[in-house]
Image: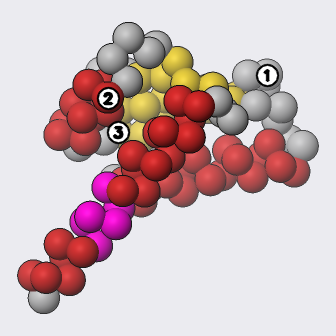
Amino acid sequence: MVTKLTQTLQDFEDLVTSGGIKSFQVSFQTKGLWIKADQGAEEQTVTLPEELLNSLLNFFYGVECINYRSHDYTNLKGFINAKVMLERLLHRNIE
């Protein structure tokens, strides 16, 4: 799930870089995150494990929407990357 979220965010970042869209926003939903282009029809919902979603909701308490290239977006990416690294480290210790 986390890798799907990482890939989806990267896809939207690539759309901005290529000029396909100007920017995008990430919003919290009941079961995951909704990523939508500011202008255009591009949008995607990524379902997240309840534990991860609750952690994000607590971390971003009071934040309804996270805009690309904002401080909150940088924090979101850092949070997700830390989660991915932790999962990889834990998975290595199990094997």
Q: Residues within 10 Å of mark 1 (few under 14, many from 20)?
A: few
Magenta segment? 83-88
Q: Residue at x 64, y 30 (%)?
A: 70
Badge 3 element: strand
Residue hosting label 1: 39
Query: Residue at label 2?
Result: 59
Distance between the alpha carbons at the discs numbered 3 and 1 = 23 Å
Residue 36 x/y as whole percent: 62, 28
Position of 36 with respect to 28 (left or right) is right
Q: Position of residue 69 (x, y in %)?
A: 69, 35
Q: Tag 2, which secondary structure? A: helix
Q: Quadrant of the C terminus?
A: bottom left
Locate residue 68, reporting x and y percent. 66, 33
Distance between mark 1 and mark 2 Cα atoms: 27 Å
Most extreme residue toward the front is 71
Q: Secondary structure at mark 1?
A: loop
Picture residue at 78% right of the left edge, 46% below the top = 15
Camera-side residue of 35 and 72: 72
Asked whether residue 44 appears in the rendered view, the answer is no
Question: For the point 78% across and 25% down, which residue is it?
Answer: 40
Which amino acid, by three-letter code, is at mark 1? Gln
Res 15 seen here: yes
Q: Amino acid at mark 3?
A: Thr
Mark closer to the chain start, 2 or 3: 3
Residue located beneath label 3 in the image:
47
Relative side of 5 to 54, left or right: right
Q: Is residue 57 magenta?
A: no
Position of residue 60 in the picture relative to residue 71 (left or right):
left
Q: Residues within 10 Å of mark 2 (few under 14, many from 20)?
A: few
